[in-house]
Image (cartoon, rainbow, N blue to C red):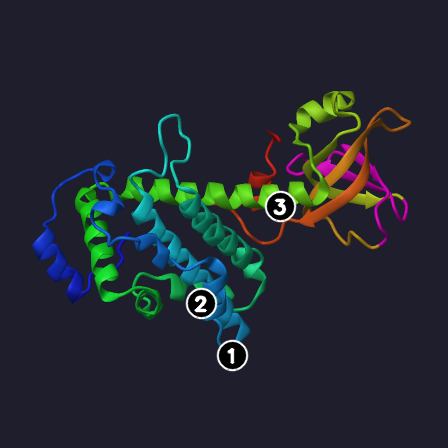
Amino acid sequence: MKLGLSVVAAQFLALAGTLPLSAQDIPASSVMPPGYLQAMPAADRVLSDMKVADSVETRARQYAAVFYLDEILDVLTWDHLYVQGGRSGLTPEEDSLRRGYGNAQNDLFSGSGKVPGLTALMTRYEAESSPLRSEILDRYFSPAWQAALMALDARYRVVENAPQTVRADRRAEKRARYLANLRNQFANKYGVQVFPNQNDLTTNPFNFEGKTVAIVVVLQQMSTATTGVFSRAGGGGHPDYVVSGIPTGTFHGPDYVVLAGRVVGRDAQNRLVQLKFIGMQPCGQERNERGVPDCVDWAAPRAL
């Protein structure tokens, strides 16, 4: 990650040197001033500070700000982000900051594709060359703090001959957190107990009887005002589920949705899996690198 090397930071580096140490060998405490983490602002404060008159520009500034601060936190915690066994090595204070930044990013990014001009504005503010980055540094951090951060970041980048791997890992980790947040929000909202493998669910729904499941489906037709027939997403349009108790007017077309429902068994014809409607969330416009809706990833089979 390029944080941008200031003149003050360059002078600091001239004194500190840039030894070819691995990330694991460089704890932030060896470079940063005492109490350095206290300077990191909470997400709620950042969201308030980034407000301007225009609501779309506000959202873009907020997203870019928490994204950048999350990157800074990456540098400060890189030596202990994970410990042996893949567990998080973050302190409670670091974890609170990370979750705050991550949740804010997810909330601001969700549905951004539906707002005209927002995605392009987010990209512009998020760019490494964006003046917003200097604004954030100067708003929250002293010159000495900034210089120490740049020195720490420069030491990490001694190994920048392999930046693609590092950046790919960071992107993958951010996306995993983004998907996990969406999954947990949906599960908590509707009391979901399992995101089942749909082959398992349609083969033997009685293994899931009475449980609240979440599945990605497409409406085939409403057979009554409150009962609908659905197929699994990407399943070729073959009907798999009949869902009762749907509030009138909930569905308007054959779009991908994540459906929460309680498994009842099979219908009277013993063909379709029968569910009682609990809730649903449209998949929206966000896509992964394969062009598949994000909901297919965050609602993938998973026990809770």
Which residue, given by chain and number where applicable, does mark 2 sit on? 61
Task: Say which element carries label 2.
Answer: helix
Q: Main secondary structure of the magenta part?
A: loop
Task: Please determine whether, in this image, residue 123 is positioned above or below residue 92.
Answer: below
The residue at 45%/58% (across/down) is 42
The residue at 60%/42% (across/down) is 184
- Per the model, the C-alpha gap separating discs 3 and 2 is 24 Å
Q: Measuring from the top left, give residue 22's x and y in whole percent.
A: 20, 37
* Crowd band around label 1 with a 10 angstrom C-alpha radius: few (<14), some (14–19), many (20+): few
Task: Say which element carries label 1.
Answer: loop
Q: Which residues are magenta?
A: 224-248
* Crowd band around label 2 with a 10 angstrom C-alpha radius: few (<14), some (14–19), many (20+): many
Three-letter amino acid code of the residue under disc 1: Ala
Q: Measuring from the top left, give residue 134's x and y in whole percent.
A: 30, 68
> Left or right: 260 with respect to 53?
right
> Left or right: 275 with respect to 59?
right
Task: Say which element carries label 3.
Answer: helix
Asked if disc 1 and disc 3 are in contact, CB closer than 8 Å, the reply is no
Number of numbered discs: 3
* Crowd band around label 3 with a 10 angstrom C-alpha radius: few (<14), some (14–19), many (20+): few
> Left or right: 23 with respect to 188?
left
Whether the magenta-drawn stretch holds residue 233 is answered as yes
The residue at 48%/48% (across/down) is 99
Residue 193 appears anywhere in the view: yes
